[in-house]
Amino acid sequence: MTDHPWLATYPKHVAWDQKFTAKPLYCLVDDTAAEFPDNIAYDFMGRELSYRDLLDQVNRMAKGLQGLGVGKGTHIGIFMPNCPQFAVAYFAILKAGGTVVNYSPLYAEHELIAQVEDSETDIMITLDLAALYPTIQAVTEKSRLKHLVVDQFANALPFPKNILFKLFQGSKIAKIVRDEYHVDFRRLMQNDGRVAAVDIDVTDDVAVIQYTGGTTGVPKGAMLTHANIYINVLQLEKWAIDIDRGKEVVPGFLPFFHVFSMTVVMDLSIFIGAKVVILPKFELDAAITLMKKYRPTLFAGVPTMFTALLKHGSARNVGMDHVKMCMSGGAPLPVELGQSFKKEMDIAISEGYGLTETSPVCASNPYDRETRNGSIGLPLPATEIIIIDREDPAKPMPLGESGEICIHGPQVMKGYWKREDATKETIINGLLHTGDVGYMDEEGFTYIIDRDKDLILVGGFNVYPRVVEEAIYQHPAVHEVTVIGVPDDYLGERPKAFVTLKDAADPLTEEDLMAFIKGKLGKHERPKAIEFRAELPKTMIGKLSKKELVAEEMAKYEKAKKAGK
């Protein structure tokens, strides 16, 4: 591409054509610990961890992992909610030379097994929580996993909460099996922390395998190199305004296992020496309590968070009165929500755009002006957005005309793990084809018309209709099923299933079918509703068609909205 229409309106504090130099990703901790050793990296329920101590724990864990045989080519999973142990494990894996594979605690057992086998994960790191351990222990017994590294959740808590948790929250703690598979997290760290140096090729060595539906709706592992993620952190830091290194406060409410939070919250915060105030998961009352106490200065969230916070009425009421930058990602930001948030909170939400395949951020609205409602903004520095003819991948579309959004930049993934075919379908002539349809205006701002037609975004989490459909198909009474995303005022979208039965007289109810699939799907994947029909719409060749159902649901939603329901 030779024309870059965004240059005329690009933020004056950012050079679009600047060059970035990458380092191994673990250097984020090394460098910041050298610059701000006594600054607090994490505050977890009142227990503080300095950058000096974070580095020490990372080094000790890295050496312990090397003692288990971890090196280049070793894939290690992290299966835990937000907590300091997540960051320690993440950077230790990288420093030992291994590759991180992020696992969602929301996944059902069979999904975890499938990802373990596909990613060739050898070791899993988790906590002794009853909500986590029994599931991952079952996965260990049924999969290729060689070791399960387990830490006590209470180890992250301050005194006396650590004691009280064990005394009064015993039902939340799982009993750990003692066998050859299990390794104690703390014992693994009982060493001098002198890690054997590993020669990292930042542009080729994979730091993280992050699973995504890509552009086809089938989960695949995006291979993100050290350079992909490190440079994305540098791009975001350059894009921001008024960053006060070593003094920022960031809420760690988004789950670190999600690529948006991994880069924008965990990695970027470490790079700028910020204090991250962690919640294991986002709960509104707890989040507001923490924000009122710590007064965050930078905030990254998904639309559902902003919807929840807006209900409380003002920035001071929710502890956001010191926020100078607010970024939304993970799902499209409704125009009405952005406008209402600005009016009630007096804080502009800058909408960004990205994909797992772009580490993840590739575009954002500038912070130096009013947000363009409905736009995903301008490309980050060193990044190109090109609108391509959907029928001819070699033909760029004129400004103002719609086509497929394509990305070129240093944050674009190496490819899909063990899926050369899918990689070739997605990266064509050096361009990442997103599957999203949009257009670019005369000033270089991009607008999305339609997202990947099948992917459902539930509160920022990817839900793949095929996964939900396959769970429903396991019921012997089900004949056909198709799943679509329907509007949800809080979560953005929720899955809805449409089902036909083999026997129209079968007494199967919605409640019966919901109960049947409950253990087969993560909570975010479960349908908002299941509707039984005599038949489902099909294409001319007999393939189940979703577009008619989507149109019906949108019409019902708009009618209910007009009626004020």
Image (cartoon, grey):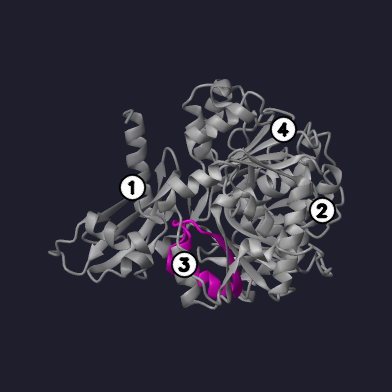
Q: Residue furthest left?
A: 505
Q: Is residue 221 left or right of residue 535?
A: right
Q: Which residue is mark 2?
A: 30
Quadrant of the frame with the N terminus = bottom right
Image spot of residue 197 (x, y percent): 84, 68
Q: CA distance from mark 4 to mark 1?
A: 38 Å
Does the magenta portion include 221? no
Q: Which residue is mark 1?
A: 552
- Amino acid type, residue under disc 3 in the picture: Glu
Is 533 or 440 nearer to us in this picture?
A: 533
Reply above or below: 536 against 156: below
Residue 394, position as x, y percentages in the image: 70, 63
Q: Which mark is residue 561?
A: none
- Contact, CB < 8 Å: mark 4 with mark 1? no
Mark on residue 111? 3
Q: CA distance from mark 4 to mark 3?
A: 39 Å
Q: Earlier in the sequence, mark 2 or mark 3?
A: 2
Q: 533 and 277: which one is in front?
A: 277
Magenta-colored span? 106-133
Q: Is residue 559 visible from the viewing direction of this image? A: yes
Check residue 117 for magenta coloring.
yes
Q: Secondary structure at mark 4?
A: loop
Residue 186 placement: quadrant: bottom right
Disc 2 to disc 3, C-alpha distance: 35 Å
Which of pointers 1 and 2 lies earlier in the amino acid sequence? Answer: 2
User: Type of residue at label 4?
Assistant: Tyr
Marks 4 and 3: which is nearer the front?
3
Q: Is residue 441 at all visible to an observer of this figure?
A: no
Residue 367: numbered disc: 4
